[in-house]
């Protein structure tokens, strides 16, 4: 059992505490509760990474028009493709900063679109939105929520939202809690995956972020909001339950 604990710890880069480790063990057929899991982790010599604080940056000092906040911190949806949220963060590499934009479906917390670049321009967020749109092809009327950053408030991005039939919603100025789901994802990415890494190149960082999003977060990571299910499996359960 200790070897299994160490394997889980290695696969998740030390991001699983006793609760998630217990859920993972039970999914593999091992009847191990949270407190026994904690004891086994101690015996195996592994511990969960401590969460760190990361600086949040949003360029909201502009004169561009902003949209009203249609969410008002209601992040609980009853079906996919009702509300998407978007945001930008950055990672340090030895070549300089790498900027990451994501689009997240609020129902499943799944990252459905992403893009990375060495510059934080409108094309970055447009690429992430286009990936999400062509992957999902949602109906008209979907709400797209973001902060008031100039990349999202600019005319090019708002025009693309209109082409895709989406309704624009924006957080209040300086209030990161209005876009808490996206901020939470970035916090998980950095705490669980990238904070201990020293990336030699932007391409190294890009490949590692893709691995986190597509191979770990969406498909393997047990999400507490989803009842400790993976985003992919959570959506599959919805599709099966609502199959015609």
Image: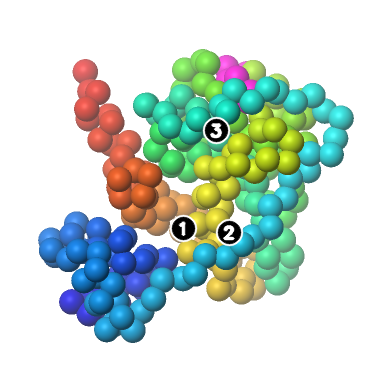
Q: Earlier in the sequence, mark 3 or mark 2?
A: 3
Q: Residues within 10 Å of mark 2 (few under 14, many from 20)?
A: some
The structure residue drawn at horizontal position 27% and vertical position 29%, both measured from the top left corner, is 239
The structure residue drawn at horizontal position 67% and vertical position 36%, both measured from the top left corner, is 147
| Disc 1, SS | helix
Q: Mark 1 sits on what residue?
A: 212
Q: Nearer the viewer, residue 120 or 145?
A: 145
Q: Mark 2 sits on what residue?
A: 206
Q: Is residue 185 above or below residue 12?
A: above
Q: Is residue 58 above or below residue 26?
A: above
Q: What number is the disc on residue 69?
A: none
Give the image location of residue 16, x and y in percent. 37, 65
Q: Residue 60's image quarter?
A: top right
Q: Nearer the observer, disc 1 or disc 2?
A: 1
Q: Quadrant of the N terminus?
A: bottom left
Instruction: Determine whether, in the image, residue 163 is placed left or right of residue 243.
Output: right
Give the image location of residue 136, x and y in percent. 44, 29
Q: Earlier in the sequence, mark 3 or mark 1?
A: 3
Q: Residue 130's image quarter?
A: top right
Q: Residues within 10 Å of mark 3 (few under 14, many from 20)?
A: few
Between the C-alphas of marks 1 and 2, the distance is 10 Å
Q: Mark 3 sits on what residue?
A: 73
Instruction: Determine whether, in the image, residue 87 is placed left or right of residue 207.
Output: right
The reply to whether the magenta stretch includes residue 165 is yes
The structure residue drawn at horizontal position 59% and vertical position 23%, both measured from the top left corner, is 70
Between the C-alphas of marks 3 and 2, the distance is 30 Å
Q: How is the image coloured?
A: rainbow
Q: Earlier in the sequence, mark 1 or mark 2?
A: 2
Q: Quadrant of the C terminus?
A: top left
């Amino acid at each position: 059992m200790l070897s299994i604990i160490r394997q889980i710890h290695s696969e998740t880069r030390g991001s699983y505490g006793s609760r998630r480790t217990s859920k993972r063990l039970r999914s593999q057929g091992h009847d191990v509760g949270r407190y026994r899991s904690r004891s086994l982790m101690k015996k195996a010599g592994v511990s969960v990474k401590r969460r760190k604080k990361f600086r949040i940056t949003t360029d909201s000092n502009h004169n561009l028009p902003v949209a009203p906040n249609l969410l008002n911190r209601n992040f609980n949806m009853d079906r996919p493709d009702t509300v998407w949220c978007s945001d930008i963060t950055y990672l340090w590499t030895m070549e300089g900063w790498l900027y990451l934009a994501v689009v997240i479906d609020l129902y499943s917390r799944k990252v459905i679109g992403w893009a990375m670049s060495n510059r934080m321009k409108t094309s970055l967020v447009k690429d992430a939105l286009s990936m999400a749109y062509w992957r999902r092809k949602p109906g008209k009327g979907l709400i797209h929520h973001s902060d008031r950053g100039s990349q999202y408030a600019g005319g090019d991005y708002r025009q693309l939202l209109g082409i895709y039939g989406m309704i624009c919603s924006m957080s209040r100025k300086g209030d990161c809690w209005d876009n808490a789901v996206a901020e939470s994802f970035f916090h998980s990415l950095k705490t669980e995956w990238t904070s201990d890494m020293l990336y030699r190149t932007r391409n190294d960082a890009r490949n590692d972020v893709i691995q986190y999003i597509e191979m770990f977060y969406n498909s393997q990571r047990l999400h507490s909001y989803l009842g400790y299910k993976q985003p992919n499996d959570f959506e599959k359960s919805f599709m099966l339950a609502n199959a015609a």
